[in-house]
Amino acid sequence: MIGLLCRALALLALLAGTLPARADELRPGYLELTQRSANDWKIVWKAPVLGGLAASATPLLPPFCRVTMDEARLSVGALVATGRAACSRTLDGSSVGLAGLEPGFTDTLLRIAPLGRPVQTERLLPGRATAIVAAVPDTMQVARTYFVIGVDHIVGGFDHLLFVVALVLLLQRGWPVVAAATAFTIAHSITLAGTTLGLFGLPQAPVEAVIALSIIFLAVEIVKAQPGRPRLSERLPWLVAFLFGLLHGFGFAGALREIGLPETDLPMALFTFNLGVEAGQMLIISATLAVIAGLRRLTPAALRRGVLASAYAIGSIASFWFIERIWA
């Protein structure tokens, strides 16, 4: 049982080693419809190469639209194709989405940008592969969509996930972890909102590199931690989390720029995205604390071995990301 718990704790870090180095790229499929004139729509279809989505799924528009797609090109692990749809009438009230989105495939983000009207965003899933084009997006639809995007982004945004896991491994106690996580959320909310609203911003490439450095910092702090001799990160964890949270907020903003935001419900989209991120963080924190509690209950020696193994794995992965990002 002890060995199983140790491996489970280390696996939280080791699994990320096979995943993309850039945590804020859009991993699901992505279908964008942008209206250019009364009857003309531009289509952008991006499908991950892994998983079969690129080979099986294709954009689906109503019969009154004539769709032509250019040859797909490979870009950062995905096939990207552009095209156009000539429609004889408005798409309002019509179904659009994907044909061939079969069970087992990844979900797809659908973004519909009518000319001079608010952007509509939907999630397409196997079994629900189409959406109705609305004249005005429903506020609750926006809230649901961006909440789920927020949860997915923290759980599937692997450097943000490893940062939160490392923070829990460093502190290992409920309230200090919650306080640090709250400071992290407040900080990334500030930079996310400011960047999205155009008040300030930073280039994405150096931000991604420094995010990797923030994970390396926490991994080093975990390894150097000694009982009775708390380091700065243990004495003021909320301050460390807040400062690094400002940087992670720029990373979240980069993801949202790629996804897009609805003009009329921008505050709701930002609020529910952040709420989703916070919910995802709580899931990660709860799972990691549960593993730590199990190890502590059995034997402190097993806990320390598991924490050190995880710290070295997290630090190694983050170091690889840092090197790759500065050379990209």
Image: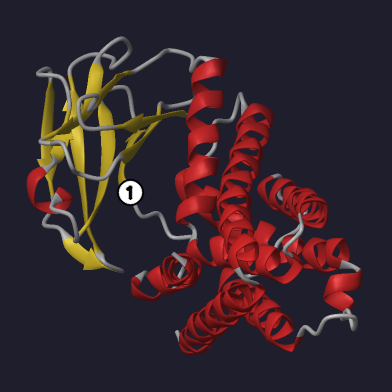
Whether residue 206 is visible: no
Q: Position of residue 195 (x, y in %)?
A: 70, 53
* Quadrant in the picture for the C terminus: bottom left
Q: Quadrant of residue 120 in the image?
A: top left
Q: Which residue is mark 1?
A: 28
**Which amino acid does the dot numbered 1 rest on?**
Pro
Residue for point 54% across, 17% down: 140
Whether residue 270 is visible: yes
Q: Position of residue 59 (x, y in %)?
A: 17, 36
Q: Nearer the viewer, residue 181 or 211?
A: 181
Q: Tell me if residue 253 comes above or below residue 227 in the rendering.
A: above
Q: Tell me if residue 313 comes above or below residue 203 in the rendering.
A: below
Q: Position of residue 257 (x, y in %)?
A: 53, 50
Q: Quadrant of residue 219 in the image?
A: bottom right
* Quadrant in the picture for the N terminus: bottom left
Residue for point 77% across, 83% down: 225
Query: SS at mark 1?
Result: loop
Q: Position of residue 55 (x, y in %)?
A: 8, 52
Q: Tell me if residue 261 comes above or below residue 258 in the rendering.
A: above
Count how many numbered circles sit on residues in the image. 1
Instruction: Give the crowd class for mark 1: few <14, some 14-19, many >=20 residues within 10 Å.
Output: some
Q: Nearer the viewer, residue 283 or 48?
A: 283
Horizontal side, residue 236 vs residue 252: left or right:
right
